[in-house]
Image (cartoon, helix red, strand yellow):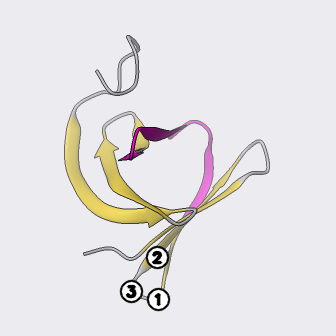
Amino acid sequence: ALFGGSSVGDVVQDFSCSFQRQTGRLYVSTDGLFFYSNLFGFEKRVRISYTQALEITKVRTTSLSVQTTEGEDYIFRSFD
């Protein structure tokens, strides 16, 4: 499991995109959004449950912005 032993729900769809200049996959599930990247052994995992997401906004046609209840901003770009 890419995100440890905890449940990620049922994956509805996944997309190729980038986060903080790392290309990976964004998984949209019934429980939240999950990003995973593995570039030359450097792994990046982002987990945002829908209960943490304050606002999810489509920016133009190429980006997705997520603001969380903790005040963090995540921007996923370059969707294929």
As displayed, is residue 25 above or below residue 8?
below
The residue at 74%/51% (across/down) is 72
Q: Residue furthest top?
A: 5
Rounded to the nearest angstrom, the CA distance separating label 1 from label 3 is: 4 Å
Marks 2 and 1 in Cβ contact (< 8 Å):
yes
Is residue 42 within the magenta segment? yes
Q: Nearer the viewer, residue 17 or 12?
A: 17
Residue lying farthest to the right in this orientation: 71
Residue drawn at x 32%, y 48% as measured from the top left: 28
Instruction: For the residues labelled 1 and 3, say whether their Cβ atoms are less than 8 Å apart.
Output: yes
**Residue carrying label 2:** 63
Question: What residue do we see at 50% from left, 40% from top?
Answer: 50
Circle 1 is placed at which residue position?
60
CA gap, disc 2 and disc 1: 6 Å
* Label 2 with label 3: CB-CB less than 8 Å: no
Q: How many marks?
A: 3
Secondary element at image label 1: loop
Q: Which residues are magenta?
A: 38-56
Q: Is residue 74 magenta?
A: no
Give the residue at the far bottom of this rendering.
Answer: 60
Residue 43 horizontal side relative to residue 15, left or right:
right
- Reply above or below: 55 against 48: below
Q: From the viewer's perspective, is 20 left or right of 71?
A: left
